[in-house]
Image (cartoon, helix red, strand yellow):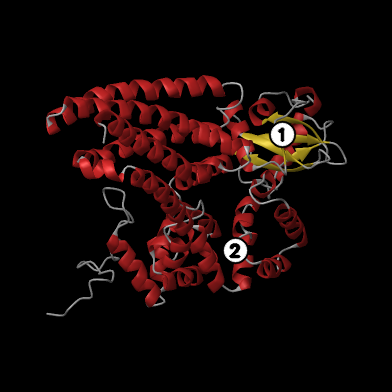
Amino acid sequence: MQEVDDKTLLPNPDGSDPVTPAFRDEEGELNPEFLAAAADAIDASDADLLQRLVEDFHESEMGDLLEALAPEHRHRLIELLGSSFDFAALTEVDEAVREEILEELETATVAEGVRELDSDDAITILESLPEDEQAEVLDQLPAIERVALQRSLDYPEDSAGRRMQTEFIAVPPFWTVGQTIDFMRETEDLPETFYEIFVIDPAAHLLGAVPLDKLLRSKRPVTIQEIMNDEPDRVEATQHQEEVARLFERYNLVSAAVVDEGGRLVGTILVDDIVDVLEEEADADIKQLGGVKSDEELSDTVLYIQRSRFPWLFANMCTALVASSIIRLFEGSLEKMVALAILMPIVASMGGNAGTQTMTVAVRALATRELGRSNAWRIIRREGAVGLLNGMAFAVIMGVLAGLWFESPELGLVIGLALITVLFFAALGGIFVPLTLNRMGVDPAVSSGPFVTSITDIVGFFAFLGIATAWFNL
């Protein structure tokens, strides 16, 4: 019997085309059989087979495939697919993967791919390139596209100008509804997605906007000026993307005009871009709360991750040394009563977890602007009350358990008092630390953790060992 390589696509016995394995399995995970088939097609430089495998792929699916492939296969896939590869897929991969792929591709290939993209996707790819390579790619683009992309790149990183789409529809106010509709029907290079028509003067100053639904419900002879909203939703090109995202969230916007400092229309930003911003910001906050850099990705190298995590761990080591020095003050008490050493980690752990709970809520509220000067004291009092109530509840639970465990009701009372103290101060520390850091202009998501941990450990150890030393005359 002839041996068959399990990694290749097998022809059916009836001579029909080979069966293409599904991209995802029943649980939604990437199918190893598909990945093996794609890798084999790339190794064999079989562009036709590869094309059959990925035909009708959405850009997000192509991005998932690129991330799953070995590094040496990624750029080869793009080269084999040629003009059929949608460069928008590169906006769906981790930044480290995107940079790695772009390093391997010819400048002409990148320029050709960028030319077919919406400007916001093109910017995402261009900003992943070094400045000299950016210039090379831009030089190979038509003048109009080059100027528009360069203008976006000149805006600050993470600004609305970097996120905006420079493709939009703008008409003068004296046009009629009929003229506008005819213009859209006859123009071939309209934006792929748009929700409103902007109204501008000869100097491109934004005068108003007309939603598509209102335009289509209006009579053809009616002028645009008659139906336009003369106070359209707008954002400054230099505004931070997080501020723009909050505006979209607050007012349920679908799109907004982007204007420069002179009020001239330079682009539009759509809700799909804002969804990406919200996801990025939430992802960054979660990572930073855990002491991980906001730009860390699963595709990063071991050395990069080690260097990025080292400072946080070093800060935690320093706070642990401070807490250990508190324990040393009560060295004699611990030698006389071993039960204190057994129960001590419980107090520290409860305090640390309580502080982290409050800190997480506070940092997220500060990020979304839900917590500010107007309600800070009310939230502080609320968290203090929660810490006190939890402290009393766990004082009863742990006091009974410790009393029965060590057959000492007095020891149960001591740990109960310590838990009330540490949970109360952990709650206060969990909100005061982020508020203070935010007032000082320091990102609370990055810096709160070590300070809160330090406070809860010091207060916990000092309260428990101090109360025990005084109560038992150790």
Tag 2: Cα neighbours inside 10 Å, few (<14), some, or many (≥20)? some
**Of callouts 1 and 2, the N-terminal one:** 2
**Label 2, on which residue?**
113
Three-letter amino acid code at the position of disc 1: Arg
Q: Residue at left 46%, top 72%?
A: 76
Picture coordinates of residue 105 (x, y %)?
Answer: 55, 72
The x and y percentages for residue 382 are 45, 20
Residue 167: percent from the left, percent from the top? 69, 47
Q: Nearer the viewer, residue 213 or 347?
A: 347
Residue 221 horizontal/vertical position (percent): 78, 25
Question: Foreground residue, 463 or 22?
Answer: 463
Mark-to-mark CA distance, 1 and 2: 30 Å
Residue at which label 1 appears: 234
Q: Amino acid at mark 2?
A: Gly
Q: Nearer the viewer, residue 63 or 17?
A: 63
- Identity of the residue drawn at 44% across and 36% down: 360
In this orientation, does residue 444 appear?
yes
Marks 1 and 2 close (CB-CB < 8 Å)? no
Q: Residue furthest right?
A: 202
Between label 1 and label 2, give the one nearer the viewer: 1
Q: In what quadrant of the picture does the C terminus appear?
A: top left
Furthest residue in direction front, as rendered: 473
**Image-based side of 62 in relation to 418, left or right:** right
Classify mark 2: helix, strand or loop. Answer: helix
Q: Is residue 195 visible?
A: no
